[in-house]
Image (cartoon, rainbow, N blue to C red):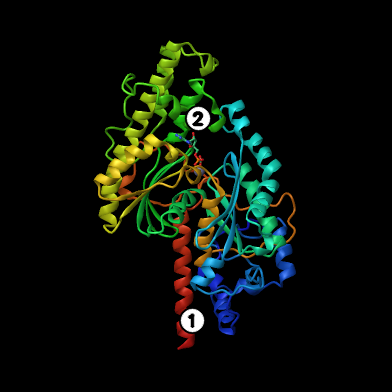
Amino acid sequence: MVRLSFFTLSPAISRFNIYPSGIISVLLAVTNPSLFRLPKQQQHHQLKTKSPTLPLLTSPLSSPSPNFQRTRFYSTGARVFSNSNYFDDNLVVLGIETSCDDTAAAIVRGNGEILSQVISSQADLLAQYGGVAPKQAEEAHSRVIGKVVQDALDRANLTEKDLSAVAVTIGPGLSLCLRVGVRKARRVAGEFNLPMVGVHHMEAHALVARLVEQELSFPFMALLISGGHNLLVLAHKLGQYTQLGTTVDDAIGEAFDKTAKWLGLDMRRSGGPAVEELALEGDAKSVKFNVPMKNHKDCNFSYAGLKTQVRLAIEAKEIDCKCPLSSATNEDRRNRADIAASFQRVAVLHLEEKCERAIDWALELEPSIKHMVVSGGVASNKYVRLRLSHIVENKNLKLVCPPPSLCTDNGVMVAWTGLEHFRVGRYDPPPPTIEPDDYVYDLRPRWPLGEEYAKGRSEARSMRTARIHPSLTSIIRADDSLQQQTQNVARKIVS
Ligand code: KG4
Ligand code: ZN
């Protein structure tokens, strides 16, 4: 099986590739002789063929894609690679996101200008299945991906030829869904000879805050709360994160979604907004739910137990989830609102407690931190934002919460994260123009963002560890170390 890799290309090698000097070739040959074996045609052929003899390019220490050294990265012919601001402002990146149930694309300029943003949501499917059904979601992505990308180009008044690179989410997420976005991204990049950046979905949720808040520099803290993740991370620099806490079972978004489903709410905008809206009518102290993990002095989360408490409360009040809210009696509606409000209060209290501790830990590790980012779909909830703003301000930090449209899944965050990595030379070369339909892509459905903080390990952890990809941080660190080695060799040869 052959996998093409994103981020397997060392930044050093990527940058060298744009300076076609003899010494660079020598250095590359020294550091990795296998890179110079094949002429381009053969390389492409080799990449397209599923061959068990080729290595899987998925480990952090694996070698760069074999076809990189022939690639020309001047996609429009007019651009010059340099580190100048001129270059940054003139970068234009297409971002594609299909990791879950939204098909999204956007085009963002290097200076942070959003040139277009298009999202096609699977609202009807969500309502029909009460959650994301992978196969149906994949089919829905496949139906609309072409139009979503075309609309993004049209609204930006651009064609593919105007792009500098294509960024696409490669994980974590549902494999079937990720595949649709990656295939489309590779087709565009292959046809128009554009470099590609494989993006980590959760890093994108965090980094989009840097597009919104120009002052936000590393290091900073982030709470990332979505349907599948509850992450507390310390962002040291681009691609390097320490994971202070995660969920031992369900994420908060999943708890919102199930609560909405069991309360018989309209799931077409996903469960969270429906619970938030109904909670406004309820008494948040009327139903006594326990705050999860009170006795765990760490920064991890658990929402499975709270979900069970909610289900039991719903059963106790004999609420019929098949009866829509609009047909409920006054008393029934009040009961549902009380449960929604009480659930939301306790779910957010859990976030507050863990954030407080995580900020203390983060400040011990990086005392210069000034900001805390709260992002991901659940961060669009007004009550979440309000409560967390108190916690963050009490710790003398500034809260950065992207606007709701950039908190929920979107293409802007992918394009922007692609831009951030592209600027420092982390990208893959354009893929071949033609790839077979059964091509095996490098998808990372289970892909941690950071390295776990030792103090933060929970005894309650029940996360499955099988088939987890090495973390983004470990890949970037290995890349940086390879870059360092290459520079050392260069210095020796030159002197
Ligand atoms: O980040 P996101 O759009 O997709 C994932 O990466 O999962 O997050 C989706 C989650 C869903 O669980 C959804 O119910 C939740 O975010 N969500 C909300 C709100 N808007 C979206 N949860 C609470 N309140 C909201 N207003
Ligand atoms: Zn997300």
Q: Quadrant of residue 217?
A: bottom left
> x%, y% of residue 312?
41, 17
> x%, y% of residue 248?
40, 37
As drawn, which residue projects farthest toward the bottom?
495
The residue at the point 61 percent across, 35 percent down is: 122
Residue occupied by mark 1: 490
Q: Is residue 111 above or below residue 289?
A: below
418 to the left or right of 358: right
373 to the left or right of 254: left
Q: Mark 1: few, some, or many residues within 10 Å (few <14, many ≥20)?
A: some
Foreground of the two, 353 or 13: 353
The residue at the point 32 percent across, 37 percent down is: 387
Foreground of the two, 39 or 237: 237
The residue at the point 58 percent across, 66 percent down is: 64
The residue at the point 54 percent across, 71 percent down is: 87
Q: Is residue 424 above or below residue 219?
A: below
Type of amino acid under label 1: Ala
Residue 43 appears in the figure: yes
